[in-house]
Image (spheres, rainbow, N blue to C red):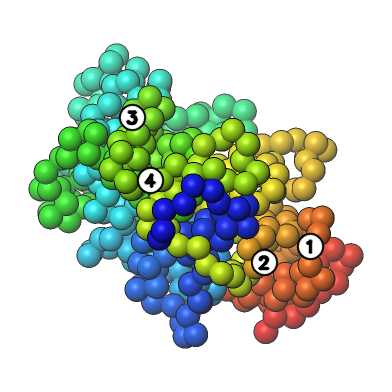
Amino acid sequence: MTRRVQISAAEARRIALRAQGFTDPRPAREPTGRDIARVLRHIGLIQIDSVNVLERAHYLPLFSRLGPYRRELLDRASHYAPRRLFEYWGHEASLIPVSTQPLLRWRMERAHTDSWGGMQRIKRDQPELVAQALAQVAERGPVAASEIAERPRRAGPWWDWSDHKRALEWLFWSGEVSSARRRRFERLYDLTERVLPPAITSAPTPPLADAQRELLRIAARGLGVAAEADLRDYFRLPAAEAKERVAELVEAGELHPVAVEGWGRTQGYLWHEAMIPRTVEARALVGPFDPLIWARLRVERIFGFSYRLEIYVPAPKRIHGYYVLPFLLGDRLVARVDLKADRARGVLAVQAEHLEPGAPPETRDALAAELASMAGWLGLEQVERIGGSVVDVS
């Protein structure tokens, strides 16, 4: 695009939505693996989370962009050969294209200093246990931590990790083992060379600066226009190193410094291939762990939408609900709904519904249509909205 020095707030919204794949029309037929690959080219990675009140988080970004699709397509890409996605620490635990794996080896090499404290302590204080865990995986993999470890104890409402689990997670962070697949969301570990394609494991490791620049390119393509903090957060890069890499991309002409209306003193950076659509005709329920809304301050800058994940907020103190999805209509986030899949009753329950100030008159009807689509995708028969109204979706 033509080099610009100033961007309006509306242009920034449209740039961001195009970069995330929301301007691509949904397939008129059942989505295929190619459609999933197209979405991944936009967003770069998919975050994983264990909360299952609605649906596992990694399935939702594809539904938001493609509409109803077969979840087995994503499972196939991340579980079986030819493997296209692997699991690692990208933006938190994530599904990432296998081609990105060499770009993250520097993180694996920093496991001694960057992994969580419990993992570091196990490696430092019980190296023989780590070696035993690796030998168990080599002999028995794919294997779950529960199959080679003592049963973990409860710590409050959560299960505490056993030392064997910490050892396996150290090996996972350091890249010696990978997740072959998940079974009822439990990670099954195997040797990395048995999980990833040989072309990936034999690929050379790029220099640190080259790898980080490429990760920032993926972030910049996925964001379109962003602050330095947004770019850094996409793959959780170290602040000082990310600052250097951003400056290098500016020097190379791949990122253009821009002023964005409403951003105040926050410096914007425009990806050199970003496009500004004239209009955006999106309609989507956006999952809480969707890359469109990872950076909460960015969501406020781009959409004027204050969003807080309230899963860990005590129920009496919640403002909008437990598992709240923003609703995208056109180029704005115009509502939010607290959703629960009540599978026993076959109902998608709308536990709370809030329209934003200035939401257009068609918001409720558009939201109803998207809720019905989601219910059908989840195999639910009805949508139950506030006030007890029930709508059949069959």
**Helix, strand or loop at mark 3:** helix
Q: Depth check: 235 or 184 in front?
A: 235
- Residue 244 is tagged as 3
**Disc 1 from disc 2: Cα separation:** 9 Å
Q: Which residue is mark 1?
A: 359
> Measuring 28% from the left and 15% from the top, which residue is drawn there?
124
Q: Do the residues bearing badges 3 and 2 touch, measured as CB atoms within 8 Å?
A: no
For the C terminus, the image quarter is bottom right
- Bin the neighbour count of mark 4 within 10 Å (Cα to Cα): few under 14, some 14-19, many 20 and up: many
> Relative to residue 19, is residue 315 drawn left or right?
right
Q: Which residue is mark 4?
A: 255
Q: Nearer the viewer, residue 14 or 197?
A: 14
Q: Amino acid at mark 3?
A: Glu
Residue 139, percent from left and from top? 17, 43
How far apart, in angstroms, are the residues tagged by discs 4 and 3? 13 Å
Report the amino acid beneath label 1: Ala
Lower sequence index among marks 1 and 4 = 4
User: Label 2 vs label 4: CA separation?
Assistant: 29 Å
Circle 4 or circle 3, nearest the eye: 4
Find the distance from the CA under tag 3 to the CA under tag 1. 41 Å
Mark toward the start of the polypeptide (3 vs 2)? 3
Q: What amino acid type should be assigned to the residue bearing mark 2?
A: Leu
Question: Quadrant of residue 173 in the image?
Answer: top left
Q: Amino acid at mark 4?
A: Leu
Above or below: residue 233 compared with residue 30: above
Residue 287 seen anywhere in this rendered image of the structure: no
